[in-house]
Amino acid sequence: MQTFTPTDSVEASDDTSFDDLDSLLTESVQIKADAKRLIDGRKRIKAGAYGLNAIERAQLEDDIARIELSREWLPKADVAMFSVQTCQCCSAVSAVFTGFFQRQSHRSLRHTDRWIAAPEHASDGLPKEIKNTDSTIVACPFCIGDFGYPVEQLGVDYSEEVME
């Protein structure tokens, strides 16, 4: 183990990037501003809102709720969500894209995530993930006719020439 005395010199690294510190400072300033808006908004509502009409009060309550939620849920990833279905009859597997979401983790409840709908291709530099929601179905379009249902009413051509 190497030890240093106050007279030893340490060579500075070439990495003089302060991007992480800048983003941390920006986040800290935003948290402080949000905390002040929360306190002020709650005081206005508690004090009778000093003549706020119903629309202004509702907007104030929405703002408070948004700030509180942003403190509880932390964005972790941009997610493309798929519903994957497996047919019990023929074991065919089909996948359907269900939309873009953002996975968020709860700040204090470990291993608690939620997925909220996100604008198309939204990204704040978050990692990209794919989430499959698996389910088993009794019959798929390929074998629903085996149960006596008129397959032609689906309006989809499942012939082998089309599927290849």
Image (tube, grey):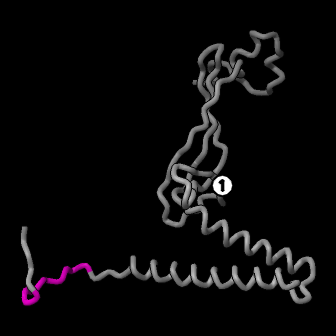
Residue at 66% across / 60% down in the picture?
119
Q: Position of residue 47 (x, y in %)?
A: 84, 85
Q: Is residue 84 above or below residue 10?
A: above
Q: Callout 1, which amino acid?
A: Ile
Query: From the image, which quarter does the N terminus lie in?
Result: bottom left
Q: Secondary structure at mark 1?
A: strand
The C terminus appears in which quarter of the rendering? top right
Q: Which residues are magenta?
A: 6-15
Residue 62, placed above or below residue 112: below
Residue 30 colored magenta?
A: no
Query: How far across and down, in percent of the image, does residue 153 sit?
Result: 84, 23
Residue that appears at 62% across and 14% down: 90
The single residue placed furthest to the front in the displayed view is: 47
User: What x and y, as percent, mark residue 130?
Assistant: 53, 45
Residue 140 placement, left or right of 21: right
Q: Quadrant of residue 42?
A: bottom right
The residue beneath circle 1 is 116
Side of 98 relative to 55 (left or right)? left
Nearer to me, 26 or 144: 26
Q: Answer whether residue 14 is magenta in the image.
A: yes
The percent position of residue 5, horizontal first and vertical second, equals 8, 84
Look at 75% across and 27% down and name the residue there. 156
